[in-house]
Image: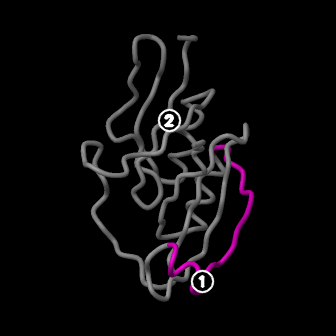
Amino acid sequence: MAIKLENVGIAVRDLEAAISFFTDLGLIVVGRDTVSGEWTDTAVGLDGNHSKIAMLHTPDGHGRLELFEYIHPEAIESNATRPNEIGMHRVAFSVDDLDAALEIAARHGCLPLRGVATYEDIYKLTYIRGPSGIIVMLAEELKKA
């Protein structure tokens, strides 16, 4: 059996704000739609499922992110995920300039959870709290491992 990761899906409270954040970081919107109907009720497991969605990909085309904003049923707010909680943890991106990525994130009100760390002189990285409380890891490779 062959398997391939298609995308990571993230529910957001404001689709336009999330798209703005991720496209400013360099992702590219490849499609947008509003979905509803029996097929989506069945696939997602929610009656009356209706949402706005956007598919984005990294410039190399390998990483895909699906963002969705629920129209119905109403989105449920929850406490922001912490790095040590079980479940969906974070989405991670390699960037060629971490300082520039952090400046972009800051313009969206998204700041590091604590600061920027260096891992064995190989990576400079940080976790930031992105739109809708999403944890986003940004890492810049300092030298080839």
Q: Nearer the viewer, residue 38 or 48?
A: 38
Check if residue 35 falls in the magenta segment: yes
- Residue 9 position (above or below residue 89): below
Q: Which mark is residue 36?
A: 1
* Label 1–label 2 contact, CB within 8 A: no
Q: Position of residue 13 (x, y in %)?
A: 47, 70
Highlighted range, magenta: 25-43
Q: Amino acid at mark 2?
A: Leu
Which residue is rendered at x = 42% and y = 43% of the image? 128
Eye-nearest disc, 1 or 2: 1
* Residue sitting at x 60%, y 75%: 52
On the image, the x and y values in percent for residue 89 come to: 36, 47
Question: Residue reaching furthest front?
Answer: 1
Location of residue 72 with respect to 80 vertically, above or below: below
Q: Secondary structure at mark 1?
A: strand
Which of the 4 image quarters holds residue 63? Answer: top right
Q: For the residue carrying disc 2, how many other residues have a C-alpha within 10 Å: few (<14), some (14-19), or many (20+)?
A: many
| Amino acid found under the numbered disc labelled 1 | Ser
Q: How is the image coloured?
A: one colour
According to the picture, the residue beneath numbered tag 2 turns out to be 138
